[in-house]
């Protein structure tokens, strides 16, 4: 993948923030502390996870994200659980499919998503309810 970190973050922000339920009608992040969003707080690790995998199997990217991102996130408990993940409050997890979409655009790949459909993947697979726009916060 030849995308720079900055390019990839812009791409992911365009995809995720524009549909995120935390986004305000003014087009800003509605979190009390926008910098606390795990997806972008840990974006270097996200990019590293993406770039560490050479596969068409999306499950391997998910595992890399868990290994490289969740493992260094302060929200994750010692047993590997995450309350934010369980409550679908982590943009990283809640919008993972859209992150995947952005990754596909960046790499030109089409991933096998069958692993996302089964129980026990540990991944929230819901699509956000809002319509996508292309505005960057
Ligand atoms: S993805 Fe993160 S930074 Fe973007 S609007 Fe949602 S909570 Fe805020
Ligand atoms: S799922 Fe939990 S541990 Fe993983 S990035 Fe999100 S908040 Fe952090």
Image (cartoon, rainbow, N blue to C red):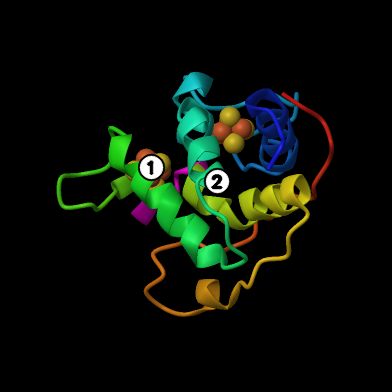
Q: Residues within 10 Å of mark 2 (few under 14, many from 20)?
A: many
Residue 135's place in the image compared with 131, above or below, is above
Residue 87 in view, yes or no: no
Q: Position of residue 74 (x, y in %)?
A: 28, 32
At 74% from the left edge and 45% from the top edge, which residue is drawn?
A: 106
At 64% from the left edge and 54% from the top edge, which residue is drawn?
A: 100
Q: Position of residue 35 (x, y in %)?
A: 49, 20
| 102, 85: nearer the viewer | 102
Q: Secondary structure at mark 2?
A: helix
Q: Which residue is mark 1?
A: 68
Q: Magenta stretch?
A: 85-91
| 23, 134: nearer the viewer | 134
Q: Which residue is mark 2?
A: 50
At 68% from the left edge and 28% from the top edge, which residue is drawn?
A: 4
Residue 30 in view, yes or no: yes
Q: Residues within 10 Å of mark 1 (few under 14, many from 20)?
A: many
Q: Residue furthest left?
A: 78
For residue 109, side relative to residue 34 (left or right): right
Residue 113's place in the image compared with 27, above or below, is below
> Which circle's residue, 2 or 1, is located before the other in the chain?
2
Q: Position of residue 116 (x, y in %)?
A: 53, 71
Whether the residue under disc 1 has CB within 8 Å of ligand 2: no
Question: On the rendering, which quadrant does ligand 1 occupy?
Answer: top right
Residue 2's place in the image compared with 41, above or below, is below
Is residue 124 covered in magenta? no
Quadrant that contains the N terminus:
top right
Q: Secondary structure at mark 1?
A: helix
């Amino acid at each position: 993948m030849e995308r720079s970190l900055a390019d990839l973050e812009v791409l992911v922000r365009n995809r995720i923030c524009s549909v995120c339920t935390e986004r305000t009608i003014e087009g800003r992040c509605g979190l009390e502390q926008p910098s606390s969003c795990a997806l972008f707080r840990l974006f270097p690790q996200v990019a590293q996870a993406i770039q560490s995998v050479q596969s068409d199997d999306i499950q391997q990217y998910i595992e890399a994200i868990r290994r490289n991102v969740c493992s260094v996130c302060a929200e994750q408990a010692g047993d590997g659980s995450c309350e934010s993940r369980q409550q679908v409050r982590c943009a990283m997890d809640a919008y993972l499919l859209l992150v995947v979409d952005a990754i596909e655009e960046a790499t030109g790949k089409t991933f096998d998503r069958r692993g996302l459909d089964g129980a026990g993947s540990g991944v929230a697979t819901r699509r956000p309810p809002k319509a996508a726009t292309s505005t960057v916060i």
